[in-house]
Image: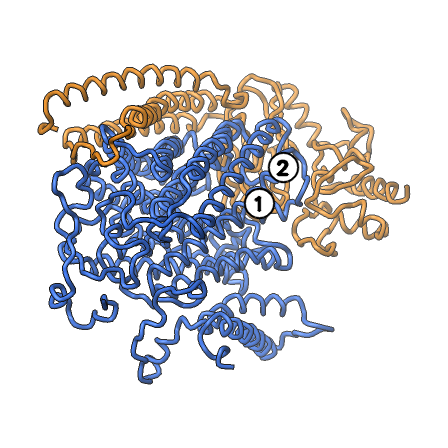
Chain colours: A orange, B blue
Amino acid sequence: MSDQPPVASRESRAQVRQMLLIGAVASAVGIALALLIDWFPVPASEQAGPIDTLWDVLLIASVPVFVLVETIVLYCAIKFRMKPGEELKDGPPIHGNTKLEIIWTAIPAILLVALCTYAYVVLTDIEKAEANSMQVRVVGEQFTWTFYYRGENGDEIASPQLYLPANTPVNFTVQSKDVIHDFWVPSFRMKIDAVPGIDTHVRVTTTGRIDEYPVVCAELCGLGHSTMRQSAHVMSREDFDAKLEELANPPEQGGGGGGGGGETDGKTLFTDAAQPTACGSCHTLADAGTTGTTGPDLDDVLGDLSEEQIRQSIVDPNAEITPGFQPNLMPRYGDSLSEEQVDALVQYLMEVKGG
Amino acid sequence: MTRLRAPGLLRGGVFFVIGVLFCAALVLVIRAAYGFPSFEGGLTGKAQNAILLVSLLGAPLFFLVGIGAFDYWFYYMAGRPTRPEDHSGHGAYSWKDYFRVNTDHKVIGIQYVVTSFFFMLLGGLLAMIVRAELAAPGMQFVDSNAYNGLFSVHASLMIFLFIIPVFAGLANYVLPLMIGAPDMAFPRLNALSFWMLPVGGIMMAASFFAPGGSFATGWTAYAPLSTDVPIGQMFFTIGVQFAGASSIATALNFLVTIVTMRAPGMSFWRMPLLVWANFSTSLLVVIATPFIAASQFFVLLDYALDFNFFHPASDGDVLMYQHVFWFYSHPAVYIMMLPGFGIISEVISVKARKPIFGYRMMAFSLLAIVLLGFTVWAHHMFVSGMQTWIRIPMMVTTAIIAVPTGIKIFSWLATLWRGVLHLDTPMLFALGFLTMFTLGGISGVMLAMVPLTIHVSDTYFIVAHIHYVLYGGSLFTIFAGVYYWFPKMTGRMFDERLGKMHFWLTFVGFNLTFGPMHLIGVQGMPRRVADYPDQFAGWNLFISLSSFLLGVASLIFVYNMVASWRAGPRAEANPWRALTLEWQVSSPPPVFNFDRVPLVVGGPYEYGVPGAQHGIFQSPAEARPKQPAGTAEGEAET
């Protein structure tokens, strides 16, 4: 710009100063607003802290960049817009400025490398292996998660919901039976794909916050993808041990154990999202008040089915597929439900059909 | 009968039917040879699917032969005397000329642009249905199969049938003009490239009529989900092959055209940045697109012939699909962005009446993006379960790619500085692009940071990011480009008032639609869900209502384009007072572009330089001796 007459140059410098001032004020306001927004779900893991802080740092670094661009565009649009009589006027023929170009190459590069370094530190922090981690195996299938714990005698204990003790490091081994799923608890901030054929791992350390959080499938896995939601219950160590005990010795004959009475009630099995079945998340049934559309509408198809066919549809759904639906959508509940639970469901559905 | 035998859509249709019959016969014969039953009281389901699948592959080829895309080459291959080129397939003299194989790059350019906008409206309509369904929790209008199909076809059409080809179309029209060439290097290949496009598009759109519904696995079609679904998936798998082949052929055509057909004096450093941008994009396409073709052929073989590439029970490798897929699909993001960078450089320089700031760095940064673009693909796979160490180098390269992008943004800003800004519709879209693309770039840098991506990958934050990049980025540049070259392409002026209304409605509607998606994504709403928890109900309703505003804005655009093309005021040759060569010929340009061969004597953006010239025109007599023999075919005959 050395070929500019000095007057224009002085004027230009004043304009730059004026714009920088506007930009600085706007950036400060922008950062304040960005930080005020309540972005994240409730934090429930030790990993949440560093990630949320990283987000704040990224916001603080990003807002001024955006404000800078926005300010220059608006300033130019207002200050340098063509005024009447300038229809044939051209701007000054500035072809470049090596010093400026070096600056706007170097500064972003330095900023980005610094951010990457910081992100790397956060990553090693949130992924570091803790001693004495609890092991939980998570298995995804269309369209449900099952969680497996190691019992005292070495047996695996299966659970339809995720139960975790507070203040405990957990190492999840994630697997899939069919297609790719993604195990995500937004409150933990951590997720990992469940990939058929390989084991993937994710570590989470729970905090002392006792509550219930959604478990979400984040990878498109087919028709029932959006219904593949369960719950993570973070509980005190005592409650957790009791829960594990209850899961290890399910009150099979009914009546035994806390809340056991509901275990064999067909309607509860059908509707309650805390049950491994939760039929209603995929099937519509007026009597149960469910509206799922992934599977056949039971109000339509139930009338044509015998008791034996209903039982078969639960135990081995692929044996006969309702026209218009794909095979392999519904898990084989014969593998995961007890005889009594199947009986209860069949009995309930027969009652609905009859009534 | 002669109409049936002459090349054209009619013969194409007949050949298409013959193709389907041929494929059916082929399948039945092969099934019989293997002893598979094909008839059990009618055609069996498996035989039906096989015939459909083979027809998807074969019948379009018959159609392309039928419309005459191969006629000249067949004569040549068969050793028969080739017909002397009489230019009968060149140029458009009535609207019917747009519906046949035409070798004029300007006709092909318009064919491309109109076809891709057709698919844009279709894809947009699908998005409207998606938003209607998402306006409230629960399922209201469609079931989850249809829903998954809607967003899958929406994304596939927008990417493969709109953004990529509309850029190819705009460049097809203006690039030969800009470098002073009479046409593209391979006009017949150019025509073939175009006609493969509607084949791919109609196939994808028609998937809704397939038994079992359309493909519903997203535009990413991750295996093994995509290898175990109804036949609709194959409409994507094979449709992409046609769109991809079209893309590769066009890119080769651009490369050869740019390298060999520049006017005398048009050195690389005198090329307009749009030409640089398409040069870079074509490099990307030629190198990367074969990878998506490969990934989809793997799926096809898995699906149809049980090759087990992706079935772990048979030693398949599930993650391999993602690596091959993203090795194309990340560079594809730049395939969808670099031509837009070129358009913005043209518009901003002309509308700010200033030379592009740092022209050489603008060109170098394009090449830097091409190179870096191949080193970042695994950032789509941070939570895929791949080897963990790859994440770190991919994080660094992903962040670094923001540097050449930043250079471009800052150079455009410096170009605006102290210019004389003509704030008309193309310029408004260019400025809108600058701000919106910056936002998309910023969320891109955020997404490079692995710890954050672990939380937000596969959420609405990603949906917001890609729409800020591809809508606020690519689509704004497309609008800028279409308005900018509309006078050149149609010979008419568009309605400036409607154009401005289109811009403001789009700008506001776009931000109201996609801005809140950042928030609900971070809050925990996964993408690609037909239903969502009640906690997101408020924002989703807001987003849906805003998206309808965006839909209305597009209708204004369509009305403006159609009405102005039919009855707009006549455009001058150079309404923007631009220096680049396409504006030095009439609007629309003569059939063979230049009655006089241009001689390029200076840079393309010398606004404000007293007495500066980019191209001067010679008489044919002066220019002819410089042309080597054999190129006379497309040369100007005055």
Residue tagged 1: A221
Same chain for the residues at labels 2 and 1, yes or no? no
Residue placed furthest toward the bottom: B80
For residue B29, above or below residue B433: below
User: Split into 4 quadrants, where in the image is the C terminus of chain B?
Assistant: bottom left
Crowding near pointer 2: few (<14 within 10 Å), some, many (20+)? many
Residue A337: quadrant of the picture: top right
Give me the disc on residue B29: none
Chain ID of residue with mark 2? B
Dot 1: what SS? Answer: loop
Horizontally, is B633 left or right of A42 in the view?
Answer: left
Query: Can residue A146 be seen from the camera position used here?
Result: no
Of residues B590 and B439, which is closer to you in this image? B590
For residue A60, above or below residue B462: above
Residue placed furthest toward the right: A355
- Between the residue at mark 2 and the residue at mark 1, the CA separation in whole angstroms equals 14 Å
For residue A263, above or below residue B214: above
x and y, in percent, of residue B201 in the image: 49, 57
Question: How many labels sit on residues?
Answer: 2
For residue B41, above or below residue A127: below
Dot 2: what SS? Answer: loop
x and y, in percent, of residue A310 in the image: 81, 49
Residue tagged 2: B531
Query: Can residue B304 be seen from the camera position used here?
Result: yes
Horizontally, is B583 left or right of A238 in the view?
Answer: left
x and y, in percent, of residue A160 in the image: 66, 35
Of residues A180 and B516, which is closer to you in this image? B516
Horizontally, is B59 left or right of B341 in the view?
Answer: right
Of residues B116 and A238, which is closer to you in this image? B116
Residue type at numbered disc 2: Asp
